[in-house]
Amino acid sequence: MNQYVDTYCERLAPGLWGEPLNALSNLAFLLAAAVLWFRYRPEDRSMRALVALLALIGLGSLSFHTAATELTRVFDVLFIALFVFFYVVCFGHWFWGLPWPRAWLFAPALALLGVLLIPVSLLIPAGSGSYLAAGVALVGLAVALRFFGPDGTRHHWRAFGIAAVVFAVSLTLRTVDLSACTGWPTGTHYLWHLLNAVVLYLVAREAMIRVSPPR
């Protein structure tokens, strides 16, 4: 698990600062979590959990882009997965009005979507296909709110739509990191971090507004 991993353009050799931009750009996740916490001061446990997971995404990714081992790679993807799956559950409860036991069914539904998209995901280079289900789900949430959302929730579709567009750009930047390396020595992966932090902030903020408006 301590085997060295080198999968990004910016990293040229082992070492904690082998990917300075990729590492420091994770501060965007911590900043997003801090803004959500201090602006909305969530009292609901599910919203607090979302903020905590957002911060853990930044810390997990930071550990991977500094230590760059198989173990820290696990931390890099684990907290992202936990955030995405927990968020769709929160969406089912707070936006669709489902009781928590039924809202939890959104998690296996997302997993099933991921399985169905595997043939397409495998065609996307740089491992970016693993995030395809999250992007499709984000579009689906926006469309569902716009046309079928319960009363008082439909206006939220715009934020999800914007988040989906930003996510598409960020995933593209993640995908072209290595291919752009010859002309852009730092690569583009750090831009994936920055824009992805914006995406997660937008969707988490929308949930916060739904549950506990800013004070």
Image: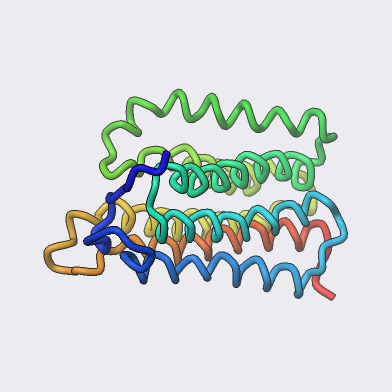
Q: Position of residue 71 (x, y in %)?
A: 46, 43
Please determine whether, in this image, residue 130 is positioned above or below residue 47: above
Q: How many marks?
A: 0
Residue at position x 81%, y 36% from top?
Answer: 98
> Residue lying furthest left in this view?
182
Q: Nearer the viewer, residue 14 or 211?
A: 14
Name the image quarter holding residue 90: top right
Residue at position x 72%, y 56% from top?
Answer: 207
> Residue lying furthest right in this view?
43
Please determine whether, in this image, residue 182 is positioned above or below residue 8: below
Name the image quarter holding residue 16: bottom left
Residue at position x 29%, y 63% from top?
Answer: 188
> Left of 22 or right of it: where is 62?
right
Q: How is the image coloured?
A: rainbow
Point out the image quarter for the C terminus: bottom right
Q: Position of residue 27 (x, y in %)?
A: 52, 70
Q: Nearer the viewer, residue 48 or 69?
A: 69
Q: Position of residue 10 (x, y in %)?
A: 26, 63
> Left of 23 or right of it: where is 40?
right
Point out the image quarter for the N terminus: top left
Q: Nearer the viewer, residue 172 or 151?
A: 172
> Left of 76 or right of it: where is 44?
right
Q: Position of residue 40 (x, y in %)?
A: 78, 69
